[in-house]
Each structure stands twice: as structure tokens, then as C-alpha cells.
Amino acid sequence: MSEHIITVAGVAVDTRHWIGGERVASTQTFEDVSPIDGSTIGDISRGTAMEAAAAVAAAKAAFPAWAATSRAERARILHAIADGVEKRIEELAIVETIDNGALLRSHRRGVMPRVAHNFRFFADWLLSLEHEDFETRGHTNHVSWDPAGPCVLITPWNAPLMLATWKVAPALAAGDTVMLKPAEWSPLTASLLADIAAEAGLPAGVLNVVQGYGSEIGDALTSHPDVRRISFTGSVPTAKRIAESAAANLTPLSLELGGKSPLLVFADADLDLAVDLAVQQYDNAGQVCLAGTRLLVEEAVVEEFTRRFVEKASALKQGDPRDEATDIGPNIHPRQLEKIDGFVQRAVAAGARAVIGGHRGDGQYYAPTLLTGVAQDSEIVQEEVFGPVLTLQTFTDEEEAVLLANGTRFGLAATVFTGNRERAERITARLVAGTVWVNCFFVRDLQAPFGGSRLSGVGREGGTWSFDFYCDVKNTVTAPSGWRNHG
Ligand code: NAD
């Protein structure tokens, strides 16, 4: 076996880039470490501007043929990739868990099936993509979705393969070619995806995977003049750097960024449901962009809500994410843990009280934390922590609830619990958020738009919105007369 192939829980993973249908090694590597126990998983090729340029060249060379491939054939290959994912769900699930520390049971049952579904969904959508012609004074306006070209897709570590394929699948369906750059803290499943895509018959150069630090390889990808689209999921500071870099060529951007989403509980809500779903905000150790990290509870029920919340949250089992009984795994990296604890300690120093948690656990774990006594303009209410840390504030009427809910620079999601339909309609109409849930959480149809407002993002992906982004949408206007080959 090649020295570049490591074995992770019995699964062979190639640590090199995948460029133009070949494995390419860099002279330098970076260490990939498991958040479960801090052990080294392997040394991964550390890309530079040279590999970035090679990947763009491969994607550019592969583009004309892939763009000219019929929709039916593209859809067939996407379904074959989905088949490959389904065959390897167990392998993908365990590798992802060891790499990023999220629960094995959710990778097995939720995340990896969704990865396969991303490919099936966009394959099917591609086949139904059409728009009725418009007529203007007898002229036909025909709308078409043309493949745009090579796309750079950059993804974070909190849901690596799910978020990568949420971009890769529509880009490939659209007829684009791809350079995927996964996060350096969770690089492995992107490499497995390259194997699966090759086995499914995806032509060389259509999907390229480049590994490395964003700060070292990112700019070479995002400022490249041959890149036609950049889709990025990650943090706001990185998004700003990418936007600056993309400005050189005015490359269109889709940005899916962080959040500080509110979860509102009115006194007339089903309190059991509200508590259950509020506790769910600790999922993935709080490393979920959509998490409703700001609990806003009507004064009249706050005591009862807090009592039930604390009871339920205290029963969560923190531990090894490979264990079926575990509810909360580790946080991704010692640096992230530092950051989380810094937020919490500064909040406490500013007068917040930790009703539960407020400290580190063993190893790379952080105790699920609920902070009260936080001011709306404080750092802990305004900034994304990206760890198992929630704040609790109260309100007395709808006006105050909306004011608090909308009172940050973010606008990714919001969740509302109320038993009053008219109130739900009044509140949701005023919330600034890309996704609003009413008496539910995390349910979403892939046909619906996904994205954030304000600092939470630019643009929407999902269903037709993905194709609008990954394609050059064209309007062809044809006059009713002027044909010489007809009578
Ligand atoms: P990050 O911004 O640090 O990194 C994301 C990716 O960007 C990584 O692959 C990284 O290598 C790359 N990168 C870093 N610098 C770069 C540069 N200069 N040029 C190009 N690429 C560069 O984010 P993270 O810490 O990996 O992820 C956490 C963030 O992602 C949180 O803010 C979270 O809310 C957000 N997120 C958003 C969504 C969403 O859909 N809105 C989903 C998941 C995560």
C-alpha cells in the first residue's frame, strides 16, 4: 500500500490531493488529529498555490466536455455517486466521527444518508429544470441554465461531507467542474468522496479535491481568473477575506456563514416541546451554525422553563462519540475549546451566571452551559461561540421579543414556540432570518431556499436557488419572423 494511504478504523484513506483524476502529493504535510483523544490520525498533503493552480487547470480542461454531457447522463452519474455513498455509509460515518468528533449514530442514521440524498435530489431537480417561455410582442423569451465553469467550494469542519456535497452535487448537476477545499481539521471524507466519484464514472478533472490550510491555499483558489463561482461555508472573517480576493475578478460568491439565532418561547407554547428542542441546541457540542443559542423566554414561564431545561440538560451524556449512548461529543480542537472558554469566562466576569456548566470537562470536552444575567449588547449575546453555550434572556411582550431576537448583526435562523397561530404569523413576519421554524426545529425541504441574512450570508442555495447560482442563467429572445429556411 502507498505510504500516502492511512487506515482509519479499517478504512483506507488517501492523504493526497485528487487533481485531474490522479493522486498528487505535496512535499509538505499537516497533521490531522482526532478530537476524541487527541491522537494523530495521519499526515495530510499540505497544498500550496501550485496545487491550487493545478486543480483549477484540471477543472478548466474538464469543463467543456462535462458541460456538454447530457443532463440525463450527468444525472445518471450523480445517482451512481449516491449509490457509492450508500454502500459506504458505515465507513464514511466512522471516518467522519474519528476526524471531527460528531456522533457516530447521527453520521450513520442522519448525515451520511443525507449526503447520498444531496446527489439524488440535485440529479432529479436537474431533469425538471425548466421555465415557461415569456412572450413579448410576439417574441419568445426562452430561459436556460448554462453551466458556468470551474467552481471553488470551501467548507468547514462541523459537518464536513454533508456541507461539501450540498455544494458539490448541485455544481456537478449544473455541468460545472469543481475544486473542493475541505477544512484542515476534518480533511478525510472529502478524499473518500473523490474515490467514490471516480468509481461512479465521473470523468477525470470534473471533481478535484485539494487539501491544506485556508490561509495558504485559499487565496490562490479564490483569486484565480478561471474560477467562475465560489461557494463558501464558514466564518464571517474568512468570508470577508474571500470576498476581497474574489473582487479581483468579480467572481460571484455564495456565502453561508455563522449565526447567533434566537429561540423564542411564549407563555402559551407547549413547554415540553420547547424544552426538548431547546436542549437539542447542544447537538454536535454546539457546533451547528443554525443553533438557537439565544433562548428568549416570556417572563411568565421562565422559572418553569428553566427548571425543566436544567433537568433535561443535566441528563445529557457527554463522552466518546462512537458510543451509542453518548449525546454530546468533544469540541473539534484545543484552540476552539480555548475560544469557547474565553467567551464564557469573560461573560461571567461581566456578571453572567452559569446555571449549568461554565467550565471545561476532561480532554476536549466542554460542559453544556446555560448563562443568565446577560445584557443584549454583551459579547456573549452578540458573538457566535460555536460551542455548547446558550444564553437565557426574558421578555414581557411581542415587541420586546422581536427587538431582542433581531438585535444582533446575524440573521441565519430563528425558532418560535407559541400555541397562537396569529401570534406566530405576526412574529415570523418581523424576524430577520433565512430560516424560521415554528414549533419545530431543523426540518427543511431541500427544494426550499437556505441561507442567511445580514452577516449570516450572501445568497441562497437549495432547489432552484442552487441552479441559479451555479449556472449562467440566460434569456434568449427570438423574433417571430426572419427565418429563411421556412416558408
Ligand atoms: P473558517 O472560516 O475558519 O474555515 C472554513 C473554511 O475556510 C476552511 O476550509 C478553511 O480552511 C477555509 N479558509 C480559511 N481561510 C481561508 C482563506 N483565506 N481563503 C480561503 N479559504 C479559507 O470556519 P470554520 O471554523 O471551519 O467553521 C465554523 C464557521 O462556519 C462558523 O462560523 C459556522 O457558523 C459556520 N457555518 C455556517 C454554516 C451555514 O450553512 N451557514 C454551516 C456550517 C458552519
Image (cartoon, rainbow, N blue to C red):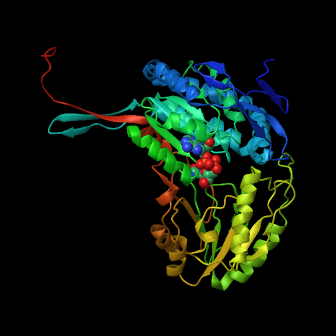
Name the residue nearer the viewer: 472 or 112: 472
Looking at the image, which residue is at 85% across and 33% down? Answer: 9
Q: Is residue 124 visible?
A: no
| Residue 264 pos. (x, y %) | 60, 72
At 16% from the left edge and 30% from the top edge, which residue is drawn? Answer: 479
> Residue 346, percent across and down?
70, 71
Q: Position of residue 253 (x, y in %)?
A: 45, 43
Relative placement, left or right, of 172 versus 289 is: left
Q: Nearer the viewer, residue 68 or 59?
A: 59
The mark total stands at 0
Question: Is residue 468 shown to the viewer in this render?
Answer: yes
Residue at point 16% right, 14% down? 485
- The answer to whether residue 321 is above or below residue 77 is below
Occupied quadrant, residue 384: bottom right
| Name of the residue lying farthest toward the front | 27
Rendered-image quadrant of the N terminus: top right
Q: Quadrant of residue 353?
A: bottom right
Question: Percent x, y for residue 6?
Answer: 80, 27
Of 108 and 359, which appears nearest the observer?
359
Residue found farthest to the top: 485
* Relative horizontal placement of residue 377, taking residue 429 as reference (left or right): right
Q: Quadrant of the C terminus?
A: top left
For residue 9, side relative to residue 241 (left or right): right
